[in-house]
Image: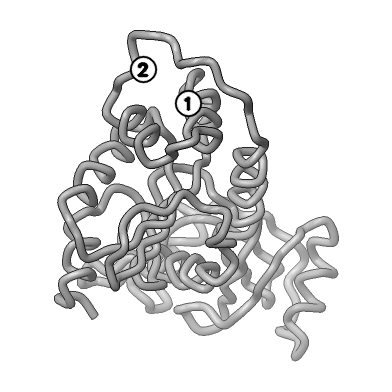
Amino acid sequence: MKIIANRAAMLAFFLCTAVLFPLAARAAEPDIAATLRHDYPTLNFQRLSPGPIEGIYQVVVEQSEIVYYLPAKGYLFTGEIWTKDGKNLTREAKAEVMTAKATQFPLDQALVIGQGPKQVIEVVDPDCPYCREGSAFFAGRSDVTRYVFFFPLNIHPDAVKKAAFVLSAKNRVAAYEDVMGGAYDQQPLPEFQDNGLLALHQQLGRHLGIRSTPNYWVNGRFVSGSNLKQVEAMLDGKSN
């Protein structure tokens, strides 16, 4: 769905495609945050800023999700806003929110791979096929230092044990390569004593609003999903 910022498109958007929660109409008030709290007292939002359409505000909820607020009508709605030339403004806004989180990673608690001058922070699931593709991609580069954090997803029942095994191993890098290479997909993991580091990684992921894997921060800039072409362009200085 593409939305063009004019009055007719806005009206169609409100009536046909958005998830709307109507309240009594009112004039816009100067303190938008106070108005939002009044309209939705149970909404826990972290950030509110002007949106891409006049009169609409962009709201960050659940640490990283984007919703929109129309204070003049008291509407709160979800969805993606596109420009007529195909730019996803909602996705770009979320990327900005996630980029700002790069400084929140405790790098001394990560699995560190490589010694290159370019920094990559990874949030991965050891049984996620896209994470494994990313692992193979980075293995072919000597110009990066990788800081790997694990966030096992519920859809992969063995991922928690595999992640705990890697983080508890004496040689974490070797254990990581074995797990991401599928060495323990058909055979049990070796016995290990969980050192509790995975619990810290999981707590961090929830705090940052991680919902899926993989996620990358390339020299501080966020890349969502397995967009390895974008990652490569950023590493090679071909992406602004």
Of all residues shown, which one is farthest toward the bottom? Answer: 30
| Residue 168 position by quadrant | top right
Q: Position of residue 194 (x, y in %)?
A: 63, 28
Indicate left or right for 42 with 227 as reference: right
Figure quadrant of the N terminus? bottom left
Residue 208 placement, left or right of 16:
right
| Label pair 2/1, CB-CB below 8 angstroms | yes
Q: Which residue is drawn at 81% across and 78% down?
A: 34
In the displayed structure image, the side of residue 193 where residue 143 appears, left or right: left
- Residue 118 vs residue 25: left or right? left
* Residue at x 76% of width, y 71% of height: 36
Q: Which amino acid does label 2 sit on?
A: Tyr
- Residue receiving disc 1: 162
For marks 2 and 1, the one nearer the N-term is 1
Amino acid of disc 1: Lys
Near-viewer residue (61 or 117): 117
* Camera-nearest residue between 158 and 99: 158
Q: What x and y, as percent, mark residue 230?
A: 21, 62
Which element carries disc 2, helix, strand or loop? Answer: loop
**134 is higher (above) or lower (below) than 181:** below
Instruction: Please tell me which residue is depicted at 22% across the width and 69% down the height of the picture.
Output: 235
Instruction: Give 183 or 159, whichever is nearer the viewer.
Output: 183
Q: Which residue is drawn at 29% across and 23% down?
A: 182
Q: Quadrant of the C terminus?
A: bottom left
Of 93 and 210, which appears nearest the observer? 210
Q: Quadrant of residue 232?
A: bottom left
- Residue corresponding to mark 2: 184
Mark 2–mark 1 distance (CA, rounded to whole Å) = 8 Å
Query: Element type at marker 1?
Result: helix
- Number of residues whose C-alpha sits closer than 10 Å to that of mark 2, classed few (under 14), some (14–19) or many (20 or more): some
